[in-house]
Image (cartoon, rainbow, N blue to C red):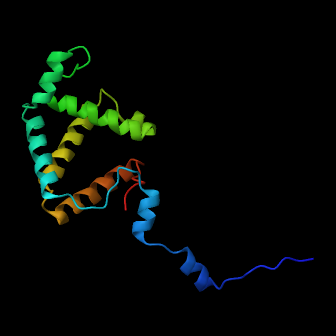
Amino acid sequence: MGSVSSVNSPAEDKKSASCSIQEMSAVLMPIYFVEDPITEVEKDKAVRSWRMIASGQAAEFYRLKKADPVNTPCSTPMEFFGNRFILRFLEVHPIAAPMFNKTSMKQGTLFFRMIAFTIAALDDDAKFDSQFVTLAKSHNRMSIRAVECK
């Protein structure tokens, strides 16, 4: 006894298997990925925060440093920001840990240059996109792949 199965045409299979980029993004992208454009309020907060960090005037860093100097071993807000960023990044992507070496001053300098550029390019979509394409290509040359990029 044989079984009866339904056979779809290739066009029907393609139609039933297709989904929008938004639907795929919702399934494939990490939970912290958002498609919504950054708002003016968020841009302003990012710019003001970065200026405080870069100029060494981050009051929260100094409050933490004074309250708990042993667990706040950084000497500058920029160093503190970099350490916190990397710790949070590694919580999400622990496999990337070998890429972050405390003795790599060059890596830290490049990281802070990238953050500064990002802040400066928030209002220029073409410049922002172009710079990140260049950044992705340079990472790809080092066999670092951005699996979470559209």
Looking at the picture, how far across and down is residue 36, in whole percent?
Answer: 27, 61
Left or right, residue 2 beside residue 61: right
Looking at the picture, how far across and down is residue 125, in whole percent?
Answer: 18, 64
**Residue 76 shows in this picture:** no
Left or right, residue 35 beside residue 80: right
Pick the residue in front: 75 or 133. 75
Q: Residue at x 23, y 61 (%)?
A: 37
- Most extreme residue toward the top is 70
Give the position of the C terminus as an image quadrant.
bottom left
Give the position of the N terminus as an image quadrant.
bottom right
Pick the residue in front: 120 or 42. 42
Looking at the picture, how far across and down is residue 104, in whole percent?
Answer: 29, 31
Looking at the picture, how far across and down is residue 83, in whole percent?
Answer: 27, 30
Q: Residue at x 20, y 58 (%)?
A: 38
Quarter where residue 22 is shown: bottom left
Q: In the image, is residue 141 above or below residue 54?
A: below
**Residue 35 shows in this picture:** yes
Left or right, residue 125 beside residue 85: left
Q: Residue at x 71, y 82 (%)?
A: 7
Pick the residue in front: 113 or 79. 79
The number of numbered badges drawn on the structure is: 0
Q: Residue at x 45, y 65 (%)?
A: 24
Q: In the image, is residue 4 above or below residue 109?
A: below
Q: In the image, is residue 88 above or below residue 149?
A: above
Quarter where residue 12 is shown: bottom right
